[in-house]
Image (cartoon, rainbow, N blue to C red):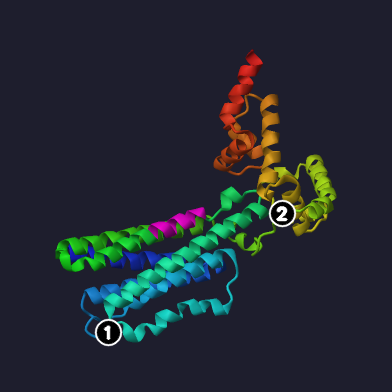
Amino acid sequence: MFEASLVNLLQAASFGVASLSILILGAYRRYRVICGFFALTCAMAIFNLLEELNITRTIHLITPVFVIGLGPMLYLVVKSLTNKLNKLEYLHLAPMILALPFTQFTQQVILVGTVWRFVYAGLALYHIYQFNLRLQDYRSDAQEVTLRWLGWLIVIMSLNNALDLVRLNVQPYLSHEINVLGQGIGTAVNLLLLMLLTTKLNREHAVICTLSEVPKSSLDVKNNKESANSYKAIFEHLDQQMNENTWYLQSRLTISDLARLCDLQVRDISRAINLNTKQSFNDYINAFRVAHVKQAMSKNPSESLLTLAINAGFNAKSSFNYSFKKQTGMTPSEFKNSLNIASES
């Protein structure tokens, strides 16, 4: 009885958290699709609760269809964060409606729905991977605005779904207490993930709103001699302008910003950088920043590394450390220590 009550409380909590998420994120137009995901979660939680209390179970089982809908909805959430959705993409939710007449086959529908969630989780992860690659070609702060955190959240959610599927398959061999406890743990994990998702989206709304500016396709081109010769002059002009104007000190510099500053086309800048340096836009800009920090270390050895990083255009210590080690093979602290040793000898 206690275990069943605990599950019901967790279902009620899921409904409460999802409802609160809608209230918090609903203020942002950008999060309309995400609010749809939370609305679906609300509906699933309330129907689960009603069925557990035997209020709707005798009429018709509804909750299995939500299992089919959650995967596509999460995929649409990921796409909505990076691009504007067209109306046809909402057809991904059609199987949820089509499954309504078959919900009496509970186990089969849940199995199909769980597999469906795995498929869409894979699609969402692939979309995030491709998007993160495009970020490298578009933003100098790519490491700071990456959606890698969302990818990990989807992975954890998928693992939780997989464990729940295992529980359902071995349910006849488990005691009632163990089965209900497993259900409660799965619900609690999902509840925690919902809270993390809401917190992250609310905290980083300003940054997430800029993600749709990233082009839908990569700006890279294949390296060939003709292209390299054509874009060498553009690159030399760009490199000269970067050194003279120190545009890399702008912390949120994007390739579109740079195109406006030097009166060039975005695609031309991307091609010039790619063909002449074999680097992404992100690496190219951060190379200037790292060089700036190295020079500042020599001039101001007492200055903190974080201050030097911020002055050079980095927004976060983690991205600074990552870029510095990628460019020099040493961490900022190791490099600074080597300078101190050299000056003492």
In the shown orientation, is residue 213 left or right of residue 259? left
Verify CB contact (< 8 Å) between mark 1 and mark 2. no
Residue 163 location (% of width, % of height) = 30, 61
Is residue 340 something one can see in this rendering?
yes
Residue at 52% in and 71% down? 32
In the shown orientation, is residue 181 left or right of residue 108? left
Does the magenta portion include 156? yes
Residue 106 drawn above or below residue 185: below
Residue 207 location (% of width, % of height) = 59, 56
In the shown orientation, is residue 44 left or right of residue 241? left
Residue for badge 2: 255
Residue at 28% in and 78% down? 106
Q: Secondary structure at mark 1?
A: loop
Tag 1: amino acid:
His
Which quadrant of the figure contains the N terminus?
A: bottom left
Residue for badge 1: 60
Dot 1 or dot 2: first in sequence order is 1
Residue 179, quarter of picture? bottom left
Tag 2: amino acid:
Ile
Which quadrant of the figure contains the C terminus?
A: top right
- Disc 2 crowd, CA 10 A, few/some/many (<14, 14-19, 20+): many
Which region of the structure is painted magenta? Answer: 148-157
In the shown orientation, is residue 271 left or right of residue 13? right
**Total number of numbered labels?**
2
Residue at 75% in and 59% down? 267
Residue 168, quarter of picture? bottom left
**Nearer-the-camera pick, 316 or 90:** 90
Residue 155 location (% of width, % of height) = 42, 58
